[in-house]
Image (spheres, rainbow, N blue to C red):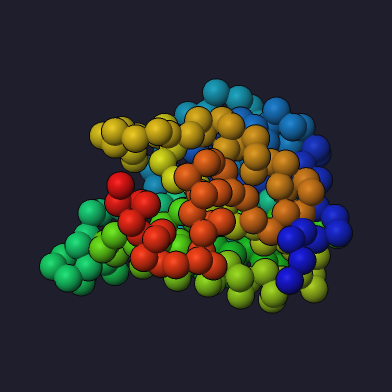
Amino acid sequence: MLDTDSHGAPIEGAVALVTGGNRGFGRAMVQELLNRGAAKVYATSRSSHSPHDARIIPLELDVTDDRSVATAAKTAADVSIIVNNAGVTLGTPVLHAPLADIRIELETNLFGIIRVTRAFAPALGRHPRSAVVNVLSVLSWVAFGSGYEISKSAAQSATNSMRMTLREQGTTVTALHVAYMDTDMAADVKAPKADPRDVARQTAEAIVTGAYEILADDTTRAVKSQLSGSLTALYTQLAA
């Protein structure tokens, strides 16, 4: 598989949709798309919010609900760029947490991506070039015992399947892998954190160039570089 498509999707003058677009990385991504000349960005959330820019269109969307996703796809039928950013982590130990909690993570982090991409694929296909970015994680490749990592690993596989399925209609599907970002989700984490604005800039560049994968920080690049080596060595380093 090639590392990029021959052409990416233009951002200038385009219409985009970012799930979970009212805070954290989603908000940074919305702003970066506008900085690069997007004509309009639908910023979705599960509750209403007031945008600071007339080009931002707030849109209520629950990625775990089929009807909500279908309604959003009808409302935002002019999009050529989708950023599947909505996600949740519940701290679910895989051997002890209620399965219902792990299902919640799967419904958002895996099936949410699938629902949104399925619903918007026809709209994306009406453009000569279009893009889907799925926000994944360095934990797509390594795990420390939680349901969150299961959901991200499964979403990585789903992303690969989407890429092969949608490429014929001119839609590039990009996987964004990143460790901790300086957002509310990681507020209590005592570890290096990437600036979401920097990750948004990398993501926008990947959309334009047609990159299949973004390794957004040093941690992610280090883990990816060792995946073909010894798992014992990799986990020993991560645990250090």
215 horizontally vs 143: left or right: right
Question: Could you tell me residue 219's position as x and y percent?
Answer: 47, 45
Count up the numbered dots.
0
207 horizontally vs 41: left or right: right
Question: Could you tell me residue 158's position as x and y percent?
Answer: 54, 71
53 horizontally vs 186: left or right: right
Q: Residue at x 57, y 43 (%)?
A: 216
Give residue 122's quadrant in the image.
Answer: bottom right
Give residue 180's quadrant in the image.
Answer: top left
48 horizontally vs 11: left or right: left
Question: Could you tell me residue 185's position as x and y percent?
Answer: 34, 40
Question: Could you tell me residue 89's position as x and y percent?
Answer: 31, 53
Q: Residue at x 68, y 31 (%)?
A: 34
Q: Residue at x 56, y 56 (%)?
A: 225
Residue 117 in sight from this viewpoint: yes
Q: Residue at x 44, y 67 (%)?
A: 230
Q: Please state, as top left, top right, bottom left or bottom right, where the N terminus lies in the image.
A: bottom right
Between residues 194 and 125, which one lies in front from this camera angle? 194
